[in-house]
Image: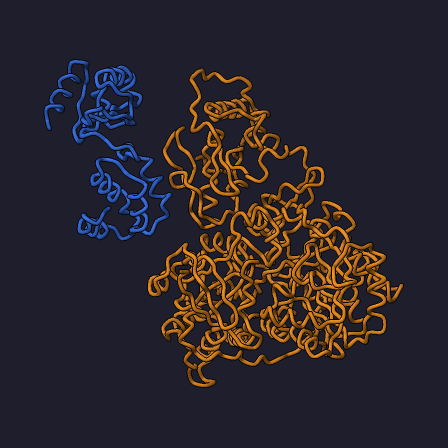
Chain colours: A orange, B blue
Amino acid sequence: MTPVLHGISILTDSPTVVSARAGALEFLLANHALDCPVCDKAGECELQDMVHKYGPHKGRHTEKKFKFHEKDYALSPVIIKNSNRCVQCIKCARVCREVVGVNVLAAIGRGDHQEETSFFKTQLDCDHCGNCIEVCPVGCFMRLPYRYKARPWDLKGADTVCAYCATGCRMVMEHRDGTVLRARAQYGVGVNSETLCARGRFGFDYINSPERLTTPHVNRYGKLEAATWVEAFDYIKESLMGVSGDEFGGIVSPRYTNEEAYLFQKLVRDVFKSANVDSTSRWEASGVEAFAAAAGMNEGGVSVFDCMEADTVVVIGAQISDENPVTDYIIRRISAARKMNVIIVSPRAMKLDSSANLLLRVAPGAEGAVLNAVALSLVPDKTGGYAQTADIAKDMIDALVAKLKASASVAIIAGTEFLRHPESCAGLGFLKDSLKSSGKKVLILPALDRCNQRGVWEMGAHPGFGPGYAGVEKRGKGTHEMLEAAMDGGITSMYAAGVDIVSMFPDAQFAQKALMRLKFLIVQDTFMTETAKMAHVVLPGATFAEKEGFYTNQEGRAQIIRSLLPPPGKAKRDFDVIKAVGEIFDTGFGPKNPALALDEMRKTNPMYRDASLAFNNKRNVDNKLDIKAALVKAADAAPPSVKCAPAAIAPKDDKYQFALMTGNHLFHSGMLSKRSVSLTGLLNSAVVEICPEDAVFYGLKPGAKVIVKGAHYEAVMTLTVRPGSKRGVAFIAENYQDCPVNRFFKKGAGTPQVAIRPCS
Amino acid sequence: MLENVKDEIQGVLKKYPDKKSAVMDMLRIAQREASGHLTKEAMDEIAGLLGMPPVEVHAAAAFYTMCRINMPAGKHRVWVCRNLPCSLMGAEHIIKYLEKKLGIKTGETTHDLKFTLDTAECLGSCGTAPMMQVDDDYFENLTESKIDEILAAKGRES
């Protein structure tokens, strides 16, 4: 290595340098397969580009080339490998270990016989994220679903944002002749840089699905039948004419763009004169207000990179490795490079545990109690100690408190468990206040699991607040109350835009019964979902790759998405559908297009007044990838303060050994990802996860079929174990069609209890 | 598989502050216990004992010529040094002669399971090139007749 000195002159393009490059490349090509004509990478291959630029255009090696193998071999259902093209840069193994943290690839052997592969080339049991493919400079690691489908120069792309979780990864979606073939990240672009997770990289293929809704459907004689837009709108007109506002409710998807959510809440509030608007089929409206207030979401955006500059990062109530994989990568990568505390409070073990220096395993829903106890220890004079939490040892709380006391700045990453157990939010707010009062800098980053959940709230798609958390004249009904009202006839008509209430509401039977009672249900979606099957009118919408607009990620970062394709068949962009429904009743309803909606939003919503939507394609220079101008600003108003009653605690029943938790599986996000062939190839049927100690204790075998029995529902699924999880906790993801986990839930009954026994 | 040598393993683990550092010792023990080679199962077991990802144990084993993966070895192992000084002094000829004499190719084991022939990078005895290592001993300044003697002597050992 030559140290840089003052006055040194460095030549990077002299004839000597160029010939040295050619020499190095000649050695790289000594064993290289040179099968560019059949290689997926040809056209965007770093080796090819280098050799094209510097030569050698003729090799001098006469020896027979060494070959690892004749045929490509698959390492996973989505990753296939040709080691003969490898240049032994070991980037794949390093990204796997240092960024993704699964550590399943390594350099086996040495010299020119060194092969980066898995343990004995066995099929990987990993995150299947494909980051090894992304970093591979040559065609050694390849996407199996994309292989031989296209050459890079055949593809047309659009720079957009992933529509699964709320990390907000920038990626390029590419299609050939109308079929979306590939999603890839770009080095140094977006919060994610060149990383993506399995969902983002492989989960886009639902866009091509033949099951997509391509035409409106109308239910006239007890059966949904294809219809024209005119028929559908006429039917909506005759059914909703004269329906009073109180009898109407609308729910918009947290995957819709901000423009669409803004227009939707305007439709419900201004056209239907109803206060009943919500944006989720899972969370209670009051829980959302409590969470937004505790997390200070109205105070503006919080960058994840600022969080990672804190002395201590607390990840609580977030199954971050599964729900926000790329946020997990960011935490792992940065925390390994600097001295900081990473504290994880969670019932389930997670991949990020290996980066943590304090782990607290708590019961599901106990996050609030832990935070309360910690906050009380920070300001002990209030009550002189803390209430003993159910099952957290005092020394663990003390260890956490000691780390917080020693930190000048604290970042708390609070996840969706706070929305499932909204009574925990009080603890979060309490801790934030006590840390602030002891002079510490506090940042709270909400970790959310739907791409635009934060955005649709800030657009006012909530019964308790309007755009920018502005107060509303009259508090409306949230999803929970709407369904209750539907049950007793208070609400007769609903408009569900992009939400699958039946599959997602935490009490499936109740949701189904309530929706059955409606006189009129409009469902707008891209697939015939369980909820759409119950609708009177089904309107075909568009996926994120077919519309223009912008999303706000969990940090509050406003990012534009771009349209890659037109919606299929007669389907329309959701903005146009919502606008057309509004125009049935009020021809002046608008804004008329997303650009005008953005203008109106900028004028009325102080959070978005200055948020920059300029797409920054700058290369990563300082590990920050942080475009501060894109973060939303503070709102003028705050979400109304609500008090969430503690959830009912089901009486302990010896019949049931496990408390049931839910969330998203690493390979899935809601029910949408179930339409992706690649992702269902990774995991299709339901699995229940417990800790290995419990499996041994109850005589259950991992991989075997078990019966999971709750008070209202039982299902057969496969058992998996996750070492390090809390005992007595079972986890079933919310993504299985064969076992909708929301059937285990009963409205108002708190955390469900289940029993697991072997399938005989 | 490593059940029989539990005590030895405990001793090895005590030698290092970080368990992972014991990987080479563990590979040596596992290879000794399984007729001179390392199986996938053994590496999996080592990974479990040391809290390492199995692929890292595999990578460590695959780096060293002493470790023989998934190919049972003969009673005696022969490594011929083929680094630059030995090659200049005729290591390639020595390898060919050994292959002919034993009737096997490099990397293979004789049918009577007596000899396994391998090559190695520099064994640190350049002054006496060409040379080879048989089990734990060095044999230097090799000639064809010297090799005949060595193999005969080793062959007589039972």
- Residue A61 location, quadrant: top left
Q: Please tell me whether residue A181 is drawn above or below residue A361 in the rendered image.
A: above
The one of A257 and A671 positioned closer to us in this rendering:
A671
Identity of the residue furthest to the bottom in this view: A383
Q: Position of residue A364 (x, y in %)?
A: 47, 70
Query: Is A642 left or right of B83, judged from the image as shown?
Result: right
Residue A341 makes an appearance in the image: no
Q: Quadrant of residue A605?
A: bottom right
Q: Position of residue B87 (x, y in %)?
A: 29, 18
Quadrant in which the C terminus of chain A is drawn: bottom left
Tell whether B50 sits left or right of A529. left
Residue at image point 78% right, 59% down: A218
Which residue is depicted at the point 85% across and 66% down?
Answer: A237
How far across and down, in percent of the image, does residue A640 sit? 66, 77
Tell me the quadrant of the picture where the N terminus of chain A can be found. top left
- Could you say which is closer to the camera, residue A708 or residue A753? A708
Identity of the residue drawn at 37% across and 57% down: A701
Query: Residue A403 placed where, x, y %?
Result: 42, 68
Q: Is residue A265 left or right of residue A104?
A: right
Q: Using the rendered image of the protein, determine whether residue B74 is visible from the camera's viewpoint.
A: yes
The answer to whether A311 is drawn above or below residue A5 in the figure is below
* Residue closest to the eye, A148 or A457: A148
